[in-house]
Image (spheres, rainbow, N blue to C red):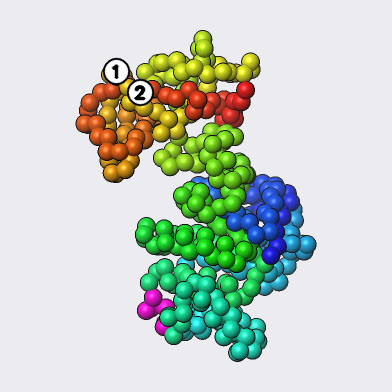
Amino acid sequence: MSGVNLSSVIKKYGETQVIHGVDLAIEPGEFCVFVGPSGCGKSTLLRMIAGLEETTGGAIRIGARDVTKLDPAQRGVAMVFQTYALYPHMSVAENMGFGLKMTGHPKAEIREKVGKAAEILKLGPFLDRNPKALSGGQRQRVAIGRAIVRGPEVFLFDEPLSNLDAELRVEMRVELARLHREIGATMIYVTHDQVEAMTLADKIVVLRAGRIEQVGAPLELYRDPDNLFVAGFIGSPAMNLMPAVPAEGGVRVAALGDQVVPARLPGHAPANLVAGVRPQSLKITEGDTHVVEMTEALGGVSFIHLAPKGAGTETRRLQIETTGETVLPQGSTCGVGADPAQLYLFDSETGQRLRN
């Protein structure tokens, strides 16, 4: 198993630069997830590691080797795409072993490697079937098995679960986590789905506009975001982000009924702030400062959508997560309280987190 190191990596298409000097170290055996909105450069970065996109500047190393200028076949990587790309006229076993067959490996070796991969992926009963006789999740496992039999140094996944329904996505997330534990290989995974990122990753790389916003373990990013973008992107439901201003003893938040939430401000605190509170750190209180727009009662948890009275913009709306079957009638009123210990403060101009 090998790690991957990116040093000042740049990608340009003509005069348009889409990757801006990315530096990143992925340790051997690590499950690293690239996450971010559409167009942030995560798939481009993955394809550069694979050699499917030319690197305009900087260096890419896999293990001790500089692979920046090497062809994809020489890099020791295997890629699993969003589409299964299986040969419909071949059996599962033939699809999984096709790459080794094309490189002249002996039939006995191919059978052995296909058998081992099928055992890991629980595909043994399906080896003689054609892809059309498989479910979507089984087809994706065949695509992963095709990568396994090649014995790569690094596995690359480009949104492999996007074509599956919700139940199969959950099942395949469990399969991928188990696969990583069993084979211990370095894996780099691209997704726009932060639930996949939070549940699979050892390390998450949050990208925006071709730049890294923050790198860290899933709960580290959730609990300690560096800026507004990461705070709003990581977490489901998203963090409530509300305009605020310094006040005596804390910050005044108009979206919380103009109440002052206790907070310690650094001496250089700007005049205009953004206060962030996770939905589970807000609570319903007595009062009539907010109007209930909708309650999503899901059984074990409920999500209550509120708007301050007279709210005219979507940015001021709040979401509260409560346990149990709490249901507030649409159009009813209530107050809202925030846990001061769970308050995040950001500079509204730079977006950077304010830390004491």
Mark 1 or 2, nearer chain start: 1
Q: Please provide the residue range marked out in magenta.
A: 129-134
Q: Residue at x 52, y 22 (%)?
A: 273
Badge 1 vs badge 2, beta-carbon distance below 8 Å: yes
Question: What x and y, as percent, mark residue 183?
Answer: 60, 67
Q: Which is nearer the eye, 164 or 20? A: 164
Q: Amino acid at mark 2?
A: Val
State left or right for residue 40 relative to residue 21: left
Q: Amino acid at mark 1?
A: Gly
Could you tell me how many numbered marks the image carries?
A: 2
Q: Which label sits on residue 42?
A: none
Q: Residue at x 46, y 49 (%)?
A: 195
Residue farthest along the bottom direction in this orientation: 107
Q: Is residue 177 above or below residue 270?
A: below
Q: Residue at x 51, y 48 (%)?
A: 198
Question: What x and y, as percent, mark residue 23?
Answer: 70, 48
Q: Which is nearer the eye, 324 or 333? A: 324
Q: Which is nearer the eye, 308 or 186? A: 186
Residue 105 seen in the current view: yes
State left or right for residue 4 relative to residue 296: right
Residue 132 appears in which quarter of the rendering?
bottom left
Q: Is residue 192 above or below residue 301?
A: below
Q: Which label sits on residue 287?
A: 1
Mark 1, secondary structure of its residue: strand
Q: Quadrant of the C terminus?
A: top right
Residue denoted by label 2: 336
Q: Is residue 237 above or below residue 276?
A: below
C-alpha separation, residue under disc 1 versus residue under disc 2: 8 Å
Q: Quadrant of the N terminus?
A: bottom right
**How many residues crowd around disc 2 within 10 Å: few (fewer than 14), some, or many (20 or more)?**
many
Residue 24: say if magenta: no
